[in-house]
Image: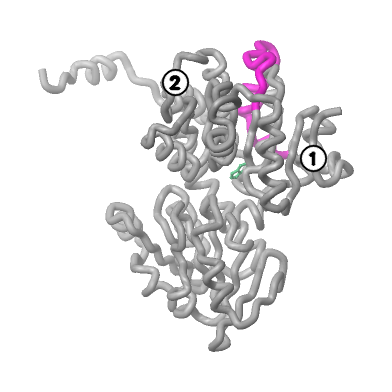
Amino acid sequence: MIPNHIKDSSLAELGKNRIEWAERDMPVLRQIRERFSKEKPLDGINIAGCLHVTTETANLMRTLAAGGANVRLCASNPLSTQDDVAAALIHHYGISVFAINGEDNDTYYDHIESCLDFNPQITHDDGADLVATLHEKYPDDKAKNIWGSMEETTTGVIRLKSLAKNKKLIFPVFSINDAQTKHFFDNRYGTGQSTLDGIIRATNRLIAGSTVVVAGYGWCGRGFATRVKGHGARVIVTEIDPVKALEATMDGFEVMPMSEAAPLGDIFCTITGDINVIRPEHFELMKDGAIVANSGHFNVEIDAKGLEKMAKKINRNVRPMVDQYILPDGHSIFLLGEGRLINLSAAEGHPAAVMDMSFALQALTGEYVAKNKGDFTVDVHDVPAEIDKWVAKIKLETMGIEVDKLTEEQEKYLASWKIGT
Ligand code: ADE
């Protein structure tokens, strides 16, 4: 019996069909899986994943298992688990899963513990909750067992860099997020599309003609802002970074502080990585019926507790994923998905075609860690540039796109530039 804790085994067939659907758009990962099946580079290694339990993650888990690893998976967010995928992973692919959509905080952390129970040597995280648990609870035993850990997301990398800076990091970690074939694509096109998808699925509101306020103009924010503009919205960007604010301005967006944007927006979305970006003083200024959502990793960007305190009445689930807060002056604010990341709570996360690159990086960097264990300093490392390049090259090939090669003359010309000699 494969250790597991999931919602409903009877969903396994549906999950398998959806995993195979996603796989069609993941040709780079498929190539890696085929090679892993023959070469078994992860033979006998215990690998724990704390990732969104989606069809795309299922294909990463299959790839690691094909490489010979013993794999355990738990959720990196209580609301993003696709229960049919969890069931299929156990019943069709023999992979251990501990994840239930809507699990409470204690169950969420019990599931992380279940993944750590089998003493993994390699981990894959999205948001660094697994690595944080290893550091907080097992610094002298399980953490010492880790050869290396991969981190998927901006927020997780910020947490890990802070651990490293404070000399608290115990084992080497690799920032998948900083790889070019990750953040240029997953953050921009993946978050861009899936955030819009989540807001539309939750509300069915017309975007054309709406005023959408986007808080944060990192790769995720700019992806989302561009996509809502394409749907015909008036887009306002708020920022704290002058360079990003300038970029947003020159990309054609209106830029202003949240206090000025608050009365103008019909839909608000935070994608900053910071806390309390939208606060009571902003809710007070918003229009009746304003919709507020978050697409940052943690549910800290909107001050939902502050909103709750202000409200004279709360109607939960006026439709799935939508809570209505009626303020003392009678105007309503609609909060989506309890302020949790909307692209994975109300929609299915990034499309498979973009996760193909992110998860190819995860699989190949895991293989690199297995091959070179013990050789790394305890720090936050970049993914090796060759892996990043390879993923771009193969992705292009699978899309049938060719690029030019340097001629001999061009190579010589470029090589002849010697700066400072
Ligand atoms: N993060 C964002 N989208 C995702 C997806 N589809 N699967 C796993 N992790 C994700």
- For the residue pair 203 and 377, the one nearer the viewer reads as 377
Horizontal relation, residue 63 to residue 221: left or right: right
> For the residue carrying disc 2, how many other residues have a C-alpha within 10 Å: few (<14), some (14-19), or many (20+)?
few
The nearer-to-camera label among 1 and 2 is 1
Q: Residue visible at 52% across and 71% down? A: 306
Q: Quadrant of the C terminus?
A: top left
Q: Residue 220, how many percent across, how many down?
A: 47, 50
Residue 333, above or below 370: below
Q: Residue 114, how many percent across, how many down?
A: 71, 35
Q: Residue visible at 61% across and 76% down? A: 325
Q: Quadrant of residue 168?
A: top left
Q: Is mark 2 within 8 Å of ligand 1?
A: no
Residue 41: in magenta span: yes
> For the residue carrying disc 1, how many other residues have a C-alpha within 10 Å: few (<14), some (14-19), or many (20+)?
some
Amino acid found under the numbered disc labelled 2: Glu
Horizontal relation, residue 354 to residue 1: left or right: left
Q: Which residue is mark 2?
A: 386
Q: Indicate the secondary structure of the residue bearing disc 1.
A: loop
Residue 308: in magenta span: no
Q: If the picture is divided into quarters, which one holds ligand 1? A: top right
Q: Residue furthest top?
A: 39
| Distance from the alpha carbon under mark 1 to that under mark 2 | 38 Å
Q: Which residue is mark 1?
A: 5
Task: Write down the region rendered in magenta.
Answer: 21-47
Q: Residue 218, how many percent across, how many down?
A: 41, 50
Among the two numbered marks 1 and 2 on one chain, the one whose residue lies closer to the N terminus: 1
Look at the image and tell me whether residue 247 can be seen: yes
Residue 159, above or below 60: below
Amino acid found under the numbered disc labelled 1: His
Horizontal relation, residue 60 to residue 391: left or right: right
